[in-house]
Image (tube, coloured by chain):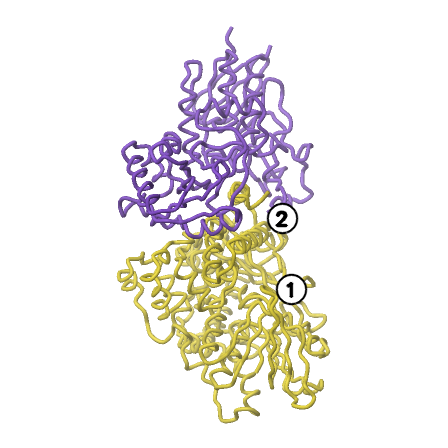
Chain colours: A purple, B yellow
Amino acid sequence: MTRHVVVIGGGAAGTAAALAASAAGARVTIALGRTGSTSLGCGALDGEPDDDASRAAEALGIYTMGTCTLATSAGTLRASTGRDRALADVAAKPGAVLVARVPHPAWDADALAASFAEQDPSRSFVARDIGLVLHTPERSMQHAELAALHDDDERLATAATRIRTALEEGGAFDSVLLPPWLGVASPRAEALSKLVGIACGEVLCAFDGPAGSRFERARDRALGHPSITIASERVRSVATSADDIIVTFTESKLDADAVVLATGGVLAGGIVYTPGDAAHAFALSYDAPVTLGLDGRALLVPGSIFGVAPESVVTPRASSPLERVGILRAPSRIFVAGDAMCDRARTMLAAFSSGTAAGRAAAKLS
Amino acid sequence: MAVIGGGVNGTGVARDLALRNLRVVLFERHDLAFGASGNSSGMIHGGVRYLETNPSVTEDSCRDSGYIQQIAPFLLSRIPFVMPIADGKKGRILLELIDAYFRAYDDYQPLKHSEPHTRLDAADLLRLEPGLVGANAGGITFDEWGVDGARLCVLNAIDAEEHGAKLCTHTTVERVARDPESGDYDIEARDLIDDRRVKARAKIVVNATGAWSPITASLGALPPSRVRVRPGKGIHVVYDRRLSNYAVLAEAIDGRQIFVMPWQNVTIIGTTDDDYFGDLDEVVSTSEEVRYLVEGVARVFPSIRAARAIGTYAGVRPTIYEYGKLEDSLSREHAIVDHEADGSPGVFSMIGGKLASFRLFSQEMSDRIARDLAPSSVCSTHTTPLPGGETETDALALAERHDLTPIATTRIVFRHGSRAKSVLANLSRDPRAREVVCPCEPVLGAEIQHAVRVEHARTVEDVARRTRLGLGACGGMRCAERCGQIIARELDLPPSVGRAQAHAFLVKQAKMRAAALGPDQARQEALAIAQMRATGGLK
């Protein structure tokens, strides 16, 4: 009999779990939930690239693995172990970089070029006008809206023409850095590079960029497998019974042979901070028979009726409990993946890796 | 004249002396309004609490509130207060007594252009402020004026500068020594940002360093015990929006009066008053203090528990020293210490005081100095407009002229008065100046440029103090880095310095927010941490 696996959470971990469980022969129902850290993500694949993680990332079709250097909207250059294909790998081409100057309030090419040049003095970063903004209303659009415009082939061709015009003004450039506008339906950097003739890519933009939307589109395509059903309701509770697990949604119930909890941490809302009125500082945002933990042990009841001292929860310099709190233990047939696990690195690759492992284990459970 | 301290007293004295054509240099260890002045409840109140014991203080306070409205009308905003009176055995009598008390206060209201008090029955009280709970006998309303303490300091300092004063911010005085021959004082200071040494010579030295006063005195080889203050820490919690119609008075568990108050586009609750023995440069709110305030306010205004706290701020009052008294019963009076008795003629310390009385205190200090040096001079700080107070400015016309939103121009006029025109002058020269850098307020690029070029802002934190950038719901995660870029460009600093400033600001704000962390804010904090990781700000 085909096993029924319910995956809760549609971020990197949940998606990887659903795909792995489906590949292992299970019937899968996945509840996507709300915006979490993957949907808010920036397109950098940080973390350890093990086989499960690499395969899961590549299965989505929008990522490429391999050490790279990403230019960020904050003006930094930083390493990553993989990236969304729209993002420029600054290390891939050795020579001068053209930074597109556009009349948009959220993009100051001159400040960025100066900042990149300060960090990598071995090469030049030159800001130059490129007519990527075609109409005045586009100046007040968000990055993701502008990225969606470049899904269109004609618009992309116009962008390529404008970039070539700028390149013809002189100077030898090996690559072009663009605002995070290169597609939402799919990453458009490679298509654009082909049209222009040299490498074009966008900067990494945390939370305001289109990378999270690109993930969601790629996820929706990948989940379009006949063995996978997408549940539109929200999960209220997960409970074990003698021989299966009951997942209660807002309006309906499902029986599952196994469940994967990939509901994220505090950032995603899977775990909520509950000062004062609860026995613990943190709680799961839905009911499930699991134990939350931090630093390898279950959460303690605080020694104050007002709850833990919040100063101990937010420590901006080192790793904060907000980044580490998660599920420590779960009963058999309930698997946990991604940021929902305690004490794990909150990275995309860790989520892909633990998601794949959880999905496979859930499907194979005897 | 050398003035040490860039709070409201230091900048007030510097302005007063500069207006009398005396040459002034002002040193500030951190930034203008870094201490108590920039972290107060933001009130130019009429001194209602002194009415019974010392009505002349009330009269002076009200008159001075009127003066400040005259010299900077744009900077003040009316804050109507409501004081609910709990029902019970004493409730009705208390209402009569308080009503009578405020009837006496009414006599002074014309001086500060305030409305007379009104007496409310229980039903009226609820109609005005539906968020109130509990059985109330009724209540009274009265009227005070709010001010942005940081703006007040900056405008005083700028006016001093425009009248010839020299301002040295982020410059800490390290030594004050008397030249035995001339009797002048040599001041050695160090710029804490670029480590540059600064020297000055002055006939008169004014120590206006608030809670730091004893430390400053010791730099001039004066006995710190001569300028003893009893530092009293006060914190405020900031919420993400205006939660009430009126400022509401409440009682804390120990009977102290506290309040919840809509202030600019947020709400603040305050304040505590606790003896402080810590580092004055790093005053941090604690969750203990936050809970004390929240529990007290929640008794009359319970929805405060569900509101989203987006930050706290903390300052230390330079209260005049007395041993054995409770914090609240300490005098808020001010005093001038003449250090001639300590062998340092011409050196004065200003201790005590409060935001609302800064101009009077500054006048007293300046009159004392001018007595010997410029006997014919008269104080004009109450008649000369502060920068921006010269003429009225139509924010809507500005919005139309510059194609900006009326919200943006209204808040620029609120902060800059008629100088709004010069803040916006750069729009035509630099297309990036119209960029909305901090959407919470909104703060425009032009205002950041103005803060750096004209108002002596040198760091992201300085800009935040002047513009409220990064102090809204996003906590700076949308604007601090951009602000750092603009500062770096304006001051010709390496981009990494601007970024480091932005991160220092974000870390400090996170620390200040932590004490008031609630469920919604926890998610925002997790997002802020993830953002710093994503862009390489946090390894």
For mark 1, what is the residue? B280
| Parent chain of label 2 | A
Left or right: A85, with A366 as reference point? left
Q: CA distance from mark 2 to mark 1?
A: 19 Å
Left or right: B397, with A69 as reference point? left
Front of the two marks 2 and 1: 1
Query: Which of the two residues, B121 or A1, is positioned nearer the viewer here?
Result: A1
Quarter the C terminus of chain A occupies: top right
Q: Position of residue A347 (x, y in %)?
A: 56, 33
Q: Residue at x 58, y 19 (%)?
A: A240
Q: Position of residue B365 (x, y in %)?
A: 56, 83
For mark 2, what is the residue? A311
Residue B328 image-quadrant placement: bottom right
Circle 2 crowding by C-alpha within 10 Å: few under 14, some 14–19, many from 20: some
Q: Position of residue B177 (x, y in %)?
A: 68, 81
Name above or below for residue A361 compared with residue A114: above
Name above or below for residue B146 compared with residue A336: below
